[in-house]
Amino acid sequence: MESAVIPTDRTNTRNSESFEAGRAGDRDTGAVGPRLPGWVIGAGLLLVTRASGAESPLAQLPAPDPSHFTHWLVSATAALSLAALGKQFLRKTPLEAEFLTKKEFGEFKTKLDQDFAAVHTKIDRCFELLSSRLAELNQAAENRTAILHERINEVRSLVDRVDERTKAKRRDNGRS
């Protein structure tokens, strides 16, 4: 990439003699154009970057005259100041815009009540299902317990009979 500096146009200067005088004084430094402050020279000179042989469209524009540039700069500053001042007086969105209206709140409340009712119904259904399963398990446990008690009672009655037989034999053995 090659860069070149384009000098200001001679027709933009008010006094061609000052331009020539500036050039004559700058021969030893190689500078082109009149002696101007750095910011004016920077504004008047365009840095052109040549890529693939094509010049930038900015290079084709004539360099601004220093007096025109200051007028433009003052105008731009005034326009931006007016824009900033106008922005302060623009109405901001009210705080109430962030809140719900009564209609929106009513719709929200209705939907929320429906959702809570649906959750309440599901919880009730699960509770009833759980209660019925627990009741079935309790009934099955009671049935097993009753069967075990009956079996224990049968075994106890059998043990009592055996005990009575052995007592009777002991008595008979003790008399003889």
Image (spheres, rainbow, N blue to C red):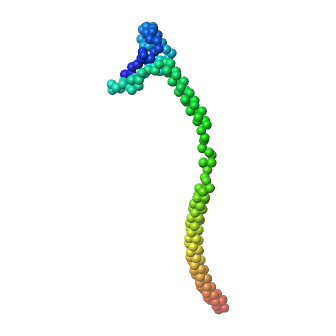
Return the x and y of residue 37 as percentages of the image width and height.
Answer: 51, 15
Residue at 59% across, 34% down = 86
Return the x and y of residue 116 as percentages of the image width and height.
Answer: 59, 62
Quadrant in the rendering for residue 166: bottom right
Return the x and y of residue 123 as percentages of the image width and height.
Answer: 58, 66
**Could you tell me how many numbered marks the image carries?**
0
Compare residues 130 and 13 and report the one nearer the observer. Answer: 13
From where the camera sits, is residue 40 visible?
Answer: no
From the viewer's perspective, is residue 112 above or below residue 147?
above
Question: Which quarter of the rendering shows the C terminus?
Answer: bottom right
Residue at 43% across, 7% down = 24
Residue at 60% across, 41% down = 92
From the viewer's perspective, is residue 99 above or below residue 51?
below
Compare residues 134 and 82 and report the one nearer the observer. Answer: 82
From the viewer's perspective, is residue 171 above or below residue 97?
below
Residue 172 is left or right of residue 47, and the answer is: right
From the viewer's perspective, is residue 65 above or below residue 104?
above
Residue 146 is left or right of residue 43, and the answer is: right
Residue 15 is left or right of residue 133, and the answer is: left
